[in-house]
Amino acid sequence: HTTDGVLEYVDRVDRQVKFRGFRVELGEIEAAVAAHPQVARAVVVTRPDGLVEPELVAYCIPAEDDECGARFDVEQVRDHAARLLPDFMLPSWFVPLAHLPLTANGKLDLSALPDPRKADAGAAEPSDGGDPHGEIEELIAQVWAEVLGRERIGADDDFFALGGHSLMALRVVARIKRVLGLSVPTRQVYRHPRLRDLAQHVEFVRRDAGAEG
């Protein structure tokens, strides 16, 4: 209501979308991402860039947006969101922006949001962090190479920084289960996006399974 009692209709407050068979509230995802201290504001949208289906992309204004991305750690923000959201609501991309593009009417200009697959939006090249060592690291490196379409994967590479997304993460855990017989929740790929860290977690799961057997 305005001060003179007139009811003004603005728009729906909620922003629900149908995603993977679920009704997803984008505002809930935005709130979870923006709760991280490195994020001043987050806008989550669905984009048709996925290989099989649309993807969720979180565009983030860093807490200190005068140096966009200087203090924005994608891995930390993703891990934070993974603790608060179910797997199907986790964005595939977390893209830092200096500011959000707006239309002349002050609304978000979706067409001006950058493609998250571009190099400046986080599509990194494999690092020089060393070759994988040991059975598990080498196995996961082979799986990543197949899923990501890469010739080489380094031990310190980040799955998502190399262009991985939620559907690819599902393929990774499916192949790990097929080869090793171990059930690794997809969430663990989000929590351990670096190859070396994921390999350590898989090794822990294998030892634990052996101890129970």
Image: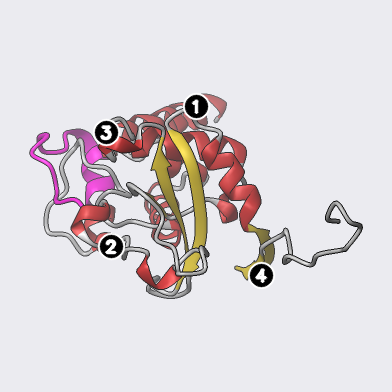
Q: Quadrant of residue 144?
A: bottom left
Residue sitting nearer the eye, 181 or 122: 122
Q: Nearer the viewer's eye, disc 1 or disc 2? A: 2
**Res. 171 mark:** none
Residue at 33%, 50% in the rendered image: 160
CA distance separating discs 4 and 2: 24 Å
On the image, the x and y values in percent for residue 210 come to: 48, 29
**Could you tell whether 128 is left or right of 118 in the image?**
left
CA distance separating discs 1 and 4: 34 Å
Quadrant where the C terminus is found in the figure: top right
**Res. 21 mark:** 4
**Res. 117 mark:** 2
- Decide which of tag 1 and tag 4 comes sooner along the chain: 4
Residue type beneath disc 4: Gly
**Could you tell whether 129 is left or right of 196 in the image?**
left
**Could you tell whether 51 is left or right of 33 in the image?**
left
Residue sitting nearer the eye, 90 or 143: 90
**Res. 196 mark:** 3
- Decide which of tag 3 and tag 2 comes sooner along the chain: 2
> Where is 88 relative to 39, above or below?
below
Label 2 Cα neighbours within 10 Å, binned few <14 / some 14-19 / many ≥20: some
Residue sitting nearer the eye, 90 or 99: 99
Label 3 Cα neighbours within 10 Å, binned few <14 / some 14-19 / many ≥20: many
Q: What kind of element bears circle 4?
A: loop
**Res. 208 mark:** 1
Q: Nearer the viewer's eye, disc 3 or disc 2? A: 2
State the extent of the magenta-drawn residues as a range: 124-142
